[in-house]
Image: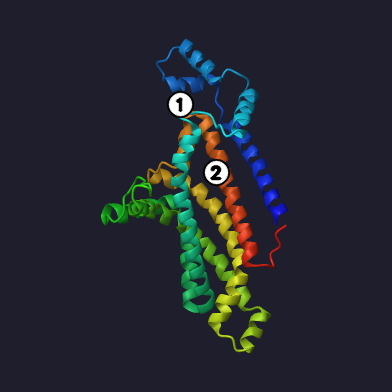
């Protein structure tokens, strides 16, 4: 187990290094473009060159990246070119917004997909067909369109939730729940649709296994068979799908944050890419990879705990 965790952490470090290196060399503009974006179109050429030199943008690309990497290892992610605010401070204020809607989306996806998948697998018939139709429909709808429809219905027409903005739970828990309700619903729809199909298929396979027939012949109730045996053995593929859904939801958060005007990591990544704010963009990429690695590690460990047949090595 310990060796497994160490290997996953080593893989995570390699992934961060790969992702930040690729990001830096793909999105880096020339130094004069970045300096002019900071100073504006009316800045003189001398001012642009002076600003570029002040930020160290006139150095070779490889030197700039290695300097950033050396500082990042010590916990210093640099400062924003545009606001001179610490990148760490920006991430501390933006990450909770993204985590609120993504983890909320994962929670809703897990609860609804297990409930609907088990219902479809056990009841079958028209309920199964209805769940499959809803799943296919849910997967075909883009989440930005779903988000806009939710705003029109629940924010503009019925005024039940705010259309935009984010409220920190430190200020108001009910306000926080209201501010993330629609973004979570928009994010979770496609995840619920995909995961429900996986849970349904896994539960059907388990219910048709020989050992389930043996348990029935011994007189165990269907409730006991379903919750104590079938669900436990079907959890492994469900958790695997959930880890993949988490990555998908994290990517979808970029669009959802723009739709609901949420100041999260996704909107920060878009803004810093457009501006050429490399330190902020690299910080967002690094933190996002860390979140993905940690969540997948937790899910792998949960997978081994729920189903001991799964070997963690």
Q: For residue 84, which numbered disc appears in the image?
A: 1
Q: Report helix, strand or loop for mark 2.
A: helix
Residue 60 visible in image: yes
Kindly tell me whether residue 140 is visible in this rendering.
Answer: no
Number of the front mark, 1 or 2: 1
Q: Say whether residue 215 is left or right of residue 38.
A: right
Circle 2 Cα neighbour tier, 10 Å, few/some/many (<14 / 14–19 / ≥20)? many
Q: Quadrant of the C terminus?
A: bottom right
User: Which of the two residues, 87 or 266, is positioned nearer the viewer here?
Assistant: 87
Residue 7's place in the image compared with 58, above or below, is: below
Which residue, given by chain and number where applicable, does mark 2 sit on? 288
Q: Is residue 67 above or below residue 213?
A: above
Q: Position of residue 206 (x, y in %)?
A: 62, 75
Q: Quadrant of residue 202?
A: bottom right
Residue 293's spot in the image, x, y percent?
61, 48
The disc, 1 or 2, on the residue closer to the chain's N-terminal end is 1
Vertical relation: 52 (above or below) 197: above
- Count the marks: 2
The residues tagged by marks 1 and 2 sit, at their Cα atoms, a distance apart of: 22 Å
Discs 1, 2 touching: Cβ within 8 Å: no
Find numbered disc 1 in the image and state the secondary structure of the residue it sits on. loop
- Asked whether 91 or 282 is in front, the reply is 91
Q: Nearer the viewer, residue 278 or 171?
A: 171
The image position of residue 234, as x and y in percent, is: 60, 70
């Amino acid at each position: 187990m310990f060796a497994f965790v160490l290997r996953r952490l080593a893989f995570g470090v390699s992934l961060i290094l790969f992702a930040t290196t690729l990001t830096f060399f793909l999105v880096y503009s020339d130094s004069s473009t970045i300096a002019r974006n900071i100073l504006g179109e009316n800045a003189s050429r001398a001012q642009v060159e002076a600003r570029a030199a002040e930020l160290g943008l006139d150095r070779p690309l490889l030197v700039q990246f290695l300097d950033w990497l050396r500082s990042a290892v010590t916990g210093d992610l640099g400062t924003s070119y545009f606001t001179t605010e610490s990148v760490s401070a920006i991430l501390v204020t933006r990450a909770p917004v993204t985590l609120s809607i993504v983890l909320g989306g994962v929670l809703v996806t897990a609860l609804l997909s297990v409930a609907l998948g088990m219902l479809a697998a056990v009841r079958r018939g028209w309920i199964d067909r209805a769940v499959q139709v809803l799943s296919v429909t849910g997967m075909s709808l883009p989440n930005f369109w779903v988000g806009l429809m939710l705003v029109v219905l629940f924010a503009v027409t019925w005024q039940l939730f705010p259309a935009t903005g984010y409220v920190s739970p430190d200020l108001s828990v009910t306000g926080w729940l209201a501010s993330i309700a629609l973004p979570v619903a928009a994010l979770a729809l496609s995840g619920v649709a995909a995961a429900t199909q996986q849970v349904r298929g896994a539960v059907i396979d388990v219910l048709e296994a020989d050992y389930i027939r043996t348990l029935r012949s011994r007189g165990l109730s269907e409730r006991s068979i379903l919750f104590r045996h079938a669900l436990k053995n079907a959890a492994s593929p469900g958790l695997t799908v959930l880890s993949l859904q988490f990555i998908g939801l994290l990517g979808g958060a970029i669009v959802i944050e723009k739709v609901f005007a949420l100041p999260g990591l996704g909107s920060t990544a878009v803004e810093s890419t457009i501006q050429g704010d490399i330190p902020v963009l690299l910080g967002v990429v690094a933190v996002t990879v860390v979140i993905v690695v940690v969540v997948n590690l937790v899910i792998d460990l949960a997978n081994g705990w729920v189903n001991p047949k799964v070997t963690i090595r």
